[in-house]
Amino acid sequence: MNRGKVDTAHGTLAYMESGGQGPAVLFIHGNSSCKEMFGRQFAAPMAERYRFIGFDLPGHGESSNAPVLERTYSINGFASAAMALLDALGVEKAAVMGWSLGGHAALEMMARWKGTVATWITGTPPAGGADMAEAFLPSDKMGLTFQRTFTEEDARTQLQGGLGEGVAMEPWMLTASLRADGRFRPLMLQSAIEGRDLDGRKIAETAAQPLAVVTGGAEPYVNNAFLEKVTYRNLWDGKVHVLDGLGHAPFWQAPEVFNPLFERFLDEVC
């Protein structure tokens, strides 16, 4: 495992690489999380065949806070930060895996970064402003998504909702949630309201690259029925993959189910 930091217009970004010599695969984590959420993919044998790259979004983990908040703290800005990271690492093309908030950034990259080979989203509905109410399930925990300040109780509530009931919370997960620069949350909402982010549904329905849509059958936030309504241009495997009994973070909850599917995706698109 290689670790490092690069300086970009969006701040200093901390990253990790698996050391594999194959095609590059970028992982983008979710709201108030960190790159270590993908540890069970980086520890898998496929990480030796592919160049897995994970990084902390600006204002998260070991990355610095954004130097210009309005430029970075949005889906659009996080996608730009990811592209800046890849440019700094000399990566000209990659498959992109995004989880939750990271999935929205991955969809933006699909439309904006010519190096996107294929995209995989989990815990992310490909939705635009007009679809948001339908794309997500009503939940009392959803209010935390845009809440500026977290108490430890807030952080635990958000984390457990993302992990799924009965899934153990690791201490570093709580540390990452409390470390996050909470200023990004309301700014992210403001950007969406003002229409500064691209329409995820339009991207899914027009992008030529393969798009894998993978969701947990017990997903607490995303309306899985909405996922089936989108008219995808190039849906990988020709279907939305629903992983029975799994929640918002199936890659962490059940890597024995998730990893073989993800590896097949990479083998087919890279």
Image (cartoon, rainbow, N blue to C red):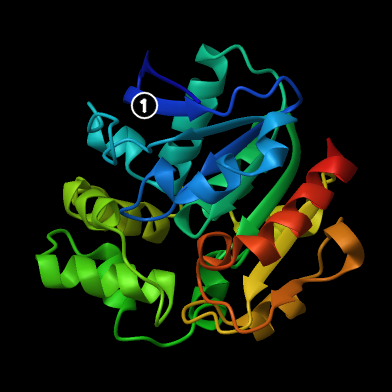
Residue 192 in percent (x, y) is at: 41, 57
91 and 54: which is toward the camera: 54
Q: Where, quadrant-wise, is the C terminus in this rendering?
A: top right
Residue 111 appears in the picture as rendered: no
User: Residue 230's image quarter?
Assistant: bottom right
Q: Quadrant of residue 246?
A: bottom right
Residue 49 visible at all: yes
SS category of the residue bearing label 1: strand
Q: Position of residue 173 (x, y in %)?
A: 29, 55
- Please name the residue that numbered disc 1 is placed on: 14
From the top left corner, tell me how far across and down residue 242 is, in percent: 71, 76
Query: Which residue is depicted at the point 30% across and 53% down?
Result: 32
| Amino acid type assigned to the residue bearing label 1 in the image | Ala
Residue shown at the point (49%, 22%) measured from the top left: 84
Q: Report the side of 77 relative to 152 (left or right).
A: right
198 or 170: nearer the viewer: 170
Q: Residue at x 90, y 66 (%)?
A: 238
Toward which corner of the image does residue 126 lie, by quadrant? bottom right
Q: Dot 1, crowdedness within 10 Å: few (<14), some or many (≥20)?
A: many
